[in-house]
Amino acid sequence: MICSSSGVPASYGQLLRAHRKKRGLSLTQLAARVHFDPGHISKVETGKRSPSVSFAKACDRVLNVGNTFTAIASALEATAHRQQNWLRPAQLPAAKRHFVGRHGDLRRLDGLLRGHDQGLAVPVTVINGPPGVGKTALAVQWAHRAVNDGHFPDGQLFVNLQGPEPGTAAAPIDVLAGLLRAVGVPPDRIPAELDQRAATFRSYLHSRKMLLILDNAADAQQIRPLLPGAPGCAVVVTSRSRLPGLTVLVDAVSLLLSELRRPEAARLIGAIIGRARADANPGAVAVLAERCGRLPLALVLAAERIVSRQHNSAEPLAAELRTRRARLDLAEGDVALRDAFESSYKALDEQSARVFRGLGLLPGRLIDVVSTASVVGVPPEEASLSLCNLAAAHLVQRHGESHYRMHDLLRAYAADLAGHLTDGSGHAMVKAPVTGLTPTPAPLAAAPLVV
């Protein structure tokens, strides 16, 4: 039993203060070393705030007292949970077996851990990027690492918000009902109104240390009612949109994902197909990675096709994917590359959809307003607005002040929608004119919206 100088069992705070003074550290000095606010430490020492396991681990490390504070904090949290009959949800999906790269992105997400026990604001990070870039995989991978390190001991909630395609996005009032049931609220105590459900959810998470992952969000309006109010919680949102309204509301941090680097893309293919196949022709693996645009979804689908067809190396599939249409047709089971692109395309307004199709007809890699307006047949100001909308949906990326770029697979998809697709050597392959376009690059003013 741990006792104070008077023989009375010491509290966590008293023990912390004793060890801090023994090391000759002020509150400010200890705060700098454990990366917590001095005010937070003061409240723990005076018993006004319960210690978290992450804080206890930092104290053990800095004060060099073994596992002393971690053991006490873990016991205190377990006791509190039993007394409050808290249902501890653990809803994280399984992490990807083959996860490569993203080291810088994982470090940025670790910033949530430095802030989720400090201050009054709930830390929110929005992982955004184009379809198929691996936003959900990154969020889940990081979440498992954080939980394994002792963070978010009160549980983890995961919700697929089913955006961004219109008519499919989950309604916040329904999402809140599921979240409340997940934390143990009886169905007959779940309020009927959206605002009341949101308030009940915030109340139930008060003083908890939980992680909430909101996957595949459509817009900021969908997210706003779902945010907890307790500073011990943290939120990770994935979306194909930047969710600018959410950034203004809660000062969210935006994390933009792009395709993998060349070595990482080749390593992902090799991890799935096995070293023997990868080493049989590493050059073909590199070519295959480039033909997949180093987009994680395309890379995984290609690698799984090699395995399912029992190819001895990546060479046959690299040759098969010489044409852009073959790359677009990548699919395994019920997962298809086209479907990922299509859900983003269907979320566009009609004007932006027409412009997107037109971008598939533009030569060269750089896109500007004048050439876009010319090929689509709209005024420059309308082309500029549509390009901004496409950038917000991550279907194009800004390149400098006046230009945009488009991922090669997305350009191929746009050309396919427009009825024009080249075989990779510059020769046109014109499919059936489902969009009503002529085979020559003509203005798209008469083209109907393709869904």
Image (tube, grey):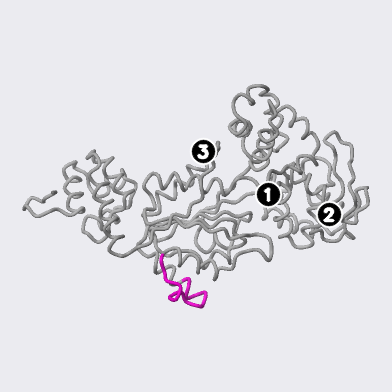
* 348 vs 330: above or below: below
| N-term-proximal mark, 3 vs 2 | 3
User: What amino acid type should be assigned to the residue bearing mark 1?
Assistant: Asp
Which is closer to the viewer, label 3 or label 2?
3
- Viewer-nearest of discs 1 and 3: 1
Q: Secondary structure at mark 2?
A: helix
| Magenta region, residue range | 184-198
> What amino acid type should be assigned to the residue bearing mark 2?
Ala
Q: Which of pointers 1 and 3 lies earlier in the amino acid sequence?
A: 3
| Disc 1 from disc 3: Cα separation | 30 Å
Residue in the picture at 36% in, 60% down:
208
Q: Quadrant of residue 332?
A: top right
Name the residue carrying label 1: 334
Q: CA distance from mark 1 to mark 2?
A: 37 Å
- Which quadrant of the view contains residue 307? top right
Left or right of residue 65: residue 430: right
The stretch drawn in magenta includes residue 428? no
Query: Is 175 left, or right, of 151 in this rendering?
Result: right
The residue depicted at 68 percent of the width and 60 percent of the height is 165
Instruction: Please state, as top left, top right, bottom left or bottom right, where the C terminus lies in the image.
Output: bottom right
Q: Identify the disc placed on residue 175.
A: none
Q: Nearer the viewer, residue 213 or 78?
A: 78
Q: Is tag 1's residue or tag 2's residue first in the polypeptide sequence?
A: 1
According to the picture, the residue beneath numbered tag 3 turns out to be 103
Mark 3 is on which residue type?
His
Q: Could you tell me residue 313's position as x and y percent?
A: 68, 26
Give x and y (percent) for residue 108.
49, 45
Q: Residue, x 58% and y 48% (percent of image)? A: 135
- Residue that numbered label 2 is attached to: 373
